[in-house]
Image (tube, rainbow, N blue to C red):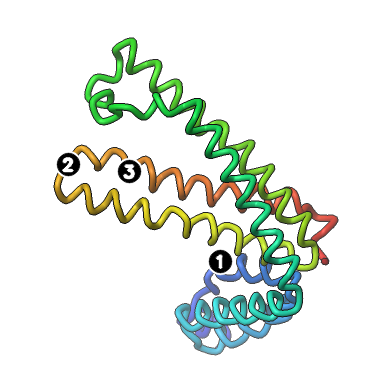
Amino acid sequence: MSQLVQLTSGDPPRLARWLLERFGRTLRLGSLVGDLDEEHADGRSRAWYWRQVVGALVVGYSRAFRTHSISFILAVAAGCAVTIAWQFASNFVLLPVYDNLWRIRQHPWTGVGVLQLSGLLLDRASVFGLCFVSAWVVTRVHRAHQRAVLVAFVLALTAQHIPWIARLATDLLGNARFATYLEYEIIGVLFHGVFVVASGLWAIGPSDSQK
């Protein structure tokens, strides 16, 4: 019978389980993993499993915010301030790299194209340092729920890019050359978010895993 249940229900969604284990630990949600696994083994769907995980994390984060709202907001604001300062410096130094980027893409192996490509790589490489510094600042300002504030910080970073992405998407309707700029913007946002999370989890480390 147990083999039949295993064949019909399958394993729980690994990503959902990982998110609950990683980001629900400081919210005292670790005990839910076993309960959800049992329910899933009894026939609950993967979609149901995802809904329970997302719901539990949303409720847990809401409670964490209400309990430690001041340090939570200060942590996100500090991380955003570090990011804005980096973006200002980067735009000042590397703004010429993005001039006529759509034309350079058509002829990437010219001297100017190689220089601009090098500038783009330098710009993206510097994001590694920004991700680590900003994530370290955020998780040190708010220590009570470090993973929760890390997620809130990534959402805040993503939200500030939405108006610009929407504008590029609108411009793309009238001029195809904006496709390159939209592509780099979306890739940059995804790249930044993923590495902030990775840097934050590394900065928190195993020593802080039980906080």
**Residue situated in front as seen by the camera: 144 or 166:** 166
Q: Left or right of 121: which side holds 86?
A: right
Q: Position of residue 190 (x, y in %)?
A: 46, 50
Q: Which mark is residue 176?
A: 2
First in residue order: circle 3 vs circle 1:
1
Residue at image x 53%, y 51%?
193
- Quadrant where the image shows the C terminus: bottom right
Q: Tell me which amino acid carries mark 1.
A: Arg
Mark 3 packing: few (<14 Cα in 10 Å), some, or many (20+)?
few
Q: Tell me which amino acid carries mark 3.
A: Glu
To which residue does mark 3 refer? Answer: 183
First in residue order: circle 2 vs circle 3:
2
Give the Cα distance between marks 1 and 2.
39 Å
Q: Secondary structure at mark 3?
A: helix
Q: Secondary structure at mark 2?
A: loop
Q: Tell me which amino acid carries mark 2.
A: Ala
- Front position among marks 2 and 3: 2
Q: Residue furthest right?
A: 207
Residue at image x 64%, y 71%?
20
